[in-house]
Image (tube, coloured by chain):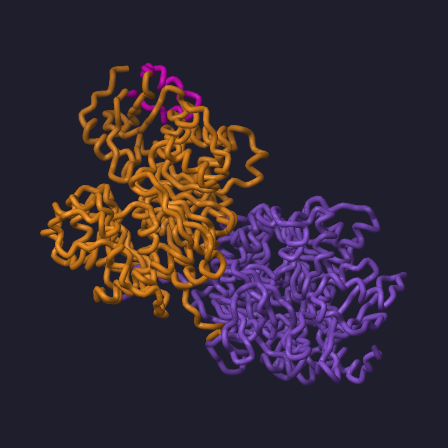
Chain colours: A orange, B purple
Amino acid sequence: MQDMMMTEQLSISAIMLHAEQVAADVQIVSVLSDGTRHRYTYAEAFARSRRLANALDRLEIPPGARVGTLAWNDYRHFELYYAVPCSGRVCHTINPRLFPEQVAYIIRHAEDSVLFLDPQFIPLLEQLHTELTGVRHYIALCPAQDLPASILPNLLSYEALLESESDLYEWPELEERTPSGLCYTSGTTGNPKGVLYSHRSTVLHCLASNMTDVMGLRAQDVVLPIVPMFHVNAWGIPYSAAMIGAKLVLPGPKAGDGMTLARLITEEQVSYALGVPTVWLALAQYLEQSASHIFSLRRAVSGGAACPLALIERMARHGVTLEVGWGMTETSPLGAYNRHQPWYDALSAEERGRQMIKAGRQVFGVQLRIVDEQGHELPRNGSTFGALQARGLWVCAGYFGGKLSQGWFDTGDVATLDPRGYLQITDRTKDVIKSGGEWISSIDIENAMMAHPQVAEATVIGVAHPRWSERPLLLVVPRRDCSPNADELLGYLKDKVAKWWLPDACVLLSELPHTATGKVSKKDLRVAFRDYQWPAR
Amino acid sequence: MQDMMMTEQLSISAIMLHAEQVAADVQIVSVLSDGTRHRYTYAEAFARSRRLANALDRLEIPPGARVGTLAWNDYRHFELYYAVPCSGRVCHTINPRLFPEQVAYIIRHAEDSVLFLDPQFIPLLEQLHTELTGVRHYIALCPAQDLPASILPNLLSYEALLESESDLYEWPELEERTPSGLCYTSGTTGNPKGVLYSHRSTVLHCLASNMTDVMGLRAQDVVLPIVPMFHVNAWGIPYSAAMIGAKLVLPGPKAGDGMTLARLITEEQVSYALGVPTVWLALAQYLEQSASHIFSLRRAVSGGAACPLALIERMARHGVTLEVGWGMTETSPLGAYNRHQPWYDALSAEERGRQMIKAGRQVFGVQLRIVDEQGHELPRNGSTFGALQARGLWVCAGYFGGKLSQGWFDTGDVATLDPRGYLQITDRTKDVIKSGGEWISSIDIENAMMAHPQVAEATVIGVAHPRWSERPLLLVVPRRDCSPNADELLGYLKDKVAKWWLPDACVLLSELPHTATGKVSKKDLRVAFRDYQWPAR
C-alpha cells in the first residue's frame, strides 16, 4: 500500500525557490581578494545562477557531468553551488591546498569536464593541464578585464560567460537521488576518495542542521562560514542558511588572521560562525592582544579537529559560546553537535568542561555505535570506548567509482557514547596507543596539555616500548617567548589524566607537521620518532 | 546517475530508536481520567509499544490494515502512535466529538479492523457496533479490572492484551512511503475525507517543525499538546518531541479549563504548549481571576482558528509568547508558523500587532501561492488576496479511497502572502463576502471586534443586499454581564478596518453555533440569517 501524499522530491532547487520567496532582499556579502566587499541579495544571486545554468547548457555540459571548482568562499562559488546541481550536474569542489599531484589525480578521477577556478589558481592548473585531457573548459572566476594571459586552453572569464545569457531558466524536476555534489577526502594513506552527495542527502542534512538543538540557524542570524566551501560543502552552510533565509558572509581567500576576522564579524554583525580550532585560536589571540571586542558573535562552532577546553573557555570570555561538532566528508558532515543546553549550567565547573568538549549529541538522521575489534556493539555508558561506526540518511555507502555497501560505515575514530547520546572522540583508530593491551586516549591527554599557559600546540603519539609494546610520547610546541620545562609539563598532567596514561617522556619542538587539511600529521611524527629511545628511569 | 549515499529510509521507527538512544530516561507524563498522573520514560513507553506490536501480530492484523483509535492524549495512545505504524499498520485516529453517524461512517470508510478506545467511548460504540461489521476487535484502553460489562463483541482490556506479550520485537524495515497514519477531516459539506500520511511525510514534517524558526523544540523543553491526538496527530508533537528527546505532558480527557491547565503547567514545568485559541482564552481568564502565574511557560502556539491580537497581548502579560501557526489535516498540518523574530521588536506597536497575528512564514517543504478565480498566480505583496494553494513534501495528493492528483492543493482559504513569505488568512473561500465585486476580509473585522472589552466572540457573515449583492453582517456574543450597544460596537470598528468593509448592521446573540472541531459554523449562521432584513438607512 502507498500513501496519498504528493510525490514532491527533495531538491536543492526547492531551497533556492524558498529563499527567493522568504528572503529575496537578504544580503550575501563576499570579501574579495583585494579586501573589498561585494554585496548583493539572494534574489540577485539566484538570477545569476540561472544565467550560469544557461551557460552550462550552451557549453554542452551533459546531465550528471562533474563541474570542478577551485575557489574560496565567495558569491561566484555560491552561484555555482546552486546552478550546477539544480541544472542536473554535479558540483565538484576541490581543495586547492592539496599537493598538485593530488589535485590532478582528483580532477582526472572525477572526470571533470569543466573547471571554474579563482585566478590565483591559474598557475597551478597551467602546471597540470597537459594531464587533464578530460577538461574541456577553464573558467576563471573574474571579470573579462582581469583575465590574465595564460596557456590554459579555452580559458574564459566567468563574467564574460554570464554576460550574454538570460536570467530566465526552467530548473528541471530532478529525482531526489540525483547526485548534486562531489567532495574528495584525502586520507593519510592511498589516493583521495570521492563522496557523491545527492539532492536528497543535502536537503535532509540541512533540515537536521537547522533544528534548534543542532546548528539551529534563524532568519535573523548573520552566518560566516570560515570553513572553506571546498571542505564538505562548508558544513552545509551555503544550503542551510538559504533554507532559513539568513544573511551570509563569505570571507574570501584571506580569512585566517584574527584582525581580519574580528573586523569582518563586527562590521557585518556576524552572529554565528564556523571554523576549525586554529581559526578560533587566532581570533582569541587577536582579541586579547588588541583588547578589542566582537559583540555581535553569540555562537561559533569548532569542527574538523578536537577542540581543547581551554579554547572554549577563552572564547567564552569574549562572549562567544564555542560549540563543538563532529562529522566527516563521508557523513555530509554532520553526525553530532554539542549545542549547549541549559542543564550544563547546573554542573560543576569540571563536569561542565567535560561536557562542553564532547563532540556532541548524535543528530537525528545519523545512527552512531561503537564496536570492539570483533565488530560487537559496545555499551553506551560514557566510559567504554570502541571503534565508531555510523549509518544514516546522509552517510555514504561507498566512494565515487567504487562499490556500494549498505552496512555501517567505519569512521576510523575511537570514541565513547553515553546514555544521552553524547559522543566523545578519544582517538583515531590509526593513532590509537595500545599500552599493555589497553587503549590510551591521546585526545584526552592533548586536551589537558593544551590548557597549559605556555603550550601553543601539543600532541601525543605511541612509540614502541620494550615492556608495554607502546607508550605515549608527548610532543609540545611552546608558545612564542615561552620555554617550559619538559618535566614540569609532564607533572602538570598528573592530576588530569589516568596515571597509566601519563606520557613517559616529553619532547619540545618548534613546530609540528600538518596535513593539507590542517590536522597534525601523526603519521609523519611516528616516522620521525620511530627510533626514539625512552629515557632511562 | 545515482548518488552513493546509503539507502536509509525515513521512518517513524528511527524516531523511536533515536529517542531511546538520547532520551531513554526522559519522562512522559499523562493525566488520567481520575485526575491522577501516570509517569514513565521513553524507554518504558517503547518497551510497551513492542509488546503492543507483538499483540497486533497475535491478533493477525495484517500489514497496511487500519487500526482505529478513539482516545484522549495519554500514554496508551502514545504507545499506539508508534506500535501501529512501526509494525507496518496504519494508525487511524478518530475524533470522538463528531456526530455518531460520522464516527460510524469514518470507521466503515477506513475499514478499521480493530478499535482501541477509552472506556468512556464504549457506550458510543455499543450504539454503533452493529453497523461496524469490519471491526474484529475492540480494545478498551484500561486495566483488566476496569473493563466494564459491554455488548461489544471481543472486547478486551489493553493491559490484559499487553500482559502476556514479550517486550522484544524486531521492527520491520519499511519503505518510506508506507502509510503510517490516517486522519479524517470533517468539512462542512459532504462526508468526512481521510488523509493518509506516510512514514516519509511524518518524519519530514517533524524535521521541519523542529527548525528554530518553526516550533523549534529543544531537548530541555517540556511540551504540552493540548490539541488532541485525534486532531492531525496533535500537530505532529508525539513524533517531533521524541525526535528531540523532550519531556511530554499528555493532558488526558479534561484539559480544557483554565485552572487545570495552569496547575498542570506549573507542576510539570511546561515550557511550550499547543492548542486552539479558546484554550488560551480560558487560561488567560483563569490567571486573571485567580491572580496566579505560570512562570515556566515561555511559548505557546495557537492554531486551528484565527487568533485575535487581543489574546496574544493578553498572554504576553502573563509572560507567554503566543505564536500563531497555520495548517490543515491535508498539510500534516504545518504550512506556516509565526515564530517571533527579533525584528518585530523594532516595529511600532500597531505594526507589531499586525505582524504577530499573521498565520506565519511559510515553512520550508511546503510551497504556498495565491491565485485568482481563473487560477492565475497573484502577487506576493502583502495586500493582494486570493485563493490559497499549497504543495509540498507533506501535502496530500488526494483522499483515502479517492484519486491522486499531483498539482496544487486548494486549501479553501483566502489569504495574502508578503515578500518575506508571511501568510495572512483573510477568509475561508466559502465564507468570503463579495460586495460590489470586491472581497471583504471577514477575519480582519472579527479580529478588530474581538479586541473590544465587552465582546466574548464576534463573527461576520455575508448577507444578500439589493445594491451590493452582499454586505457584511456583524454577529456578537457579549462577555458575561456586559450589554454593549450594537451601534457603539459598529462605531468601534470605524478607524480599524477599511470604510467599505464596515458591517452594515450588528446583531447581539447569546451564543454562536460551532462545528465539532470548535470553529464558528458560518454555514449555520448564513442559513439562520438568510432572510435577514437590512435596517433602513
Farthest residue to the left: give it: A130
Q: Which range is magenta?
A: A482-507
Task: Please give the name of the residue rendered at 77% of the width and 74% of the height, measured from the top-left corner.
Answer: B473
The image quadrant where one finds the C terminus of chain A is: top left
Decide: is B383 above or below A187: below
Q: Is residue B229 above or below residue A121?
A: below
In the rendered image, the vertical position of residue A443 relative to residue B142, given as above or below:
above
Q: Is residue A119 magenta?
A: no
Residue B33: in sight, yes or no? no
Is residue B503 visible from the viewing direction of this image? Answer: yes
Near-viewer residue (A63 or B112):
A63
Splitting the image into 4 quarters, where does residue B52 fall?
bottom right
| Location of residue A200 in the rendering, given as x and y in whole percent from the top left corner | 38, 61
**Going by the image, does A38 lie left or right of B351?**
left
Q: How many labels does the image show?
A: 0
Left or right: B317 with respect to A63? Answer: right
Placement of A377 over or under B325, stated as above or below: above
Q: Does the magenta run of residues contain A493?
A: yes
Residue A85's quadrant in the figure?
Answer: bottom left
At x 40%, y 54%, the residue is A239
Residue in the foreground of this view, choosing between B511 and A136: A136
Residue ranking furthest to the front: B537
Q: Is residue B533 left or right of residue B346?
A: right
State the image coordinates of residue B389 (x, y, percent, origin top left).
Answer: 54, 72
Q: Which of A410 and A142 is in front in this view?
A: A142
Give residue A178's position: percent from left, percent from top.
32, 65
| Residue plotted at (12% across, 45% down) | A127
Give the x, y percent position of residue B63: 49, 74
